[in-house]
Amino acid sequence: MQNNCIYLDNNATTKVDPEVIEVMLPYLTDYYGNPSSMHTFGGQVGKAVRTAREQLAAILGADESEIVYTSCGTEGDNAAIRAALLAQPEKRHIITTQVEHPAVLNVCKQLETQGYSVTYLSVNHQGQLDLDELEASLTGNTALVTIMYANNETGTVFPIEQIGLRVKEYGAIFHVDAVQAVGKIPLNMKTSTVDMLTLSGHKLHGPKGIGALYIRRGVRFRPFMIGGHQERGRRAGTENVPGIIALGKAAQLELLHLEDATTRERRLRDRLEQTLLTTIPDCVVNGDVTQRLPNTTNIGFKYIEGEAILLSLNKYGICASSGSACTSGSLEPSHVLRAMGLPYTTLHGSIRFSLCRYTTEAEIDQVIEVMPSIVERLRALSPFKNDDAGWLQGQSLVISH
Ligand SMILES: *Cc1c(COP(=O)(O)O)cnc(C)c1O
């Protein structure tokens, strides 16, 4: 296997920083002790875990005691949602959005079958929420509001603190899936309205298999994993020590690079986006370009299939994405773009490029160079080019809903 690809799929997963690998390796080899053990050998591992916890707490402006390690972002979302409901058994209503990650959306769908009522807030064509709709949905029966910080597909950032102020008026627990926000947006839990916040290691140049849930001190929490007393009884199971050490270092590096990396990524992203928009006819940016992650652009190319664009890009060694990885493999267009009410002409031809601090100027140049001819060639093959009605009809043969 070799890897010389141009990797612009960082919202799906990221490269582990070599410094992160360096600090975690000894905990896979020499320092394999259990951090809960009484002996010195285990104790020194426990000390390293405490340092890593401080490093992670720092990027959130949180206290170490407010961090609970999980195996991934999905576990963090599941644990937060279940804990909030178990802590308030008398309340049976949940508010979320139509554009959440499946790790939230599918949990909510299952809870509907268990007697909970769920409000799925809609979004406008830019992917933004209507705070009046949120306000109208909140009641004294609302146990939990779970809303993502930033959308993985479009990069659209929600006004989390404005949402939180409304949620607090009704006494509901406020959980935020911040998997795409940590390391890209400055966060400070000390001045935040957020009660619980999910993050994941592999989205911020850490390894897969480690994540964390921030739980504000004083927020009632019922554990999802039952067993030993690890994580102050909030998540049983022997700690993933190498993962925890790695996540600490990854968080430290993200915080260190946050300002310069995001400035650089935003500039590269904007150049990519602007150039594609000017050199390729009939394409549009999906999402809220004023409130957006610095590393993400989602562009809809009319009259062609996103999957066909991806396959062509793949021949040049360029990795991007159409819709989320979790839904790819099916012909269903992304639930996020559908919730935004995009026309069918662009719904199927949307591509996400997501950059990171390793993305280079030359890589962006390469994408800018190949994209116009890819789109032109695919459109030449498309029987419905420049024909919205024909394209629509053709699509309805494939997708029936
Ligand atoms: C990737 C992602 C998740 C899931 O995280 P895993 O660590 O892969 O389980 C959840 N929410 C968002 C917004 C994501 O982008």
Image (cartoon, helix red, strand yellow):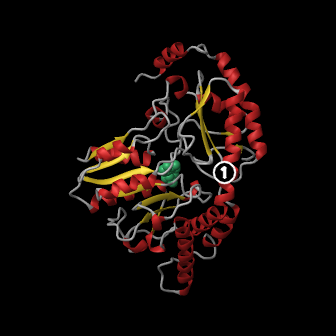
Q: Nearer the viewer, residue 365 or 318?
A: 365
Q: Secondary structure at mark 1?
A: loop
Outermost residue, left direction? 90
Q: Which residue is mark 1?
A: 356
Image position, residue 371 (x, y; %): 71, 30
In this rendering, the answer to whether 1 lies above or below 369 is: below
Q: Nearer the viewer, residue 363 or 295?
A: 295
Identify which residue is drawn at 79% across, 43% down. Answer: 362
* Side (left or right) of 46 relative to 164: right
Vertical placement of residue 179 versus 20, above or below: above
Residue 302 falls in which quadrant of the image?
top right
**Quadrant in the rendering for residue 309:** top right
Between 333 and 170, the residue placed more toward the observer is: 170
Q: Position of residue 25 (x, y in %)?
A: 65, 68
Residue 240 is at least partly visible in this image = yes
The percent coordinates of residue 229 (x first, y second) are 38, 74
Residue 231 pos. (x, y %): 43, 72
Q: Residue at x 56, y 45 (%)?
A: 292
Indicate the amino acid at tag 1: Cys
Quadrant that contains the C terminus:
top left
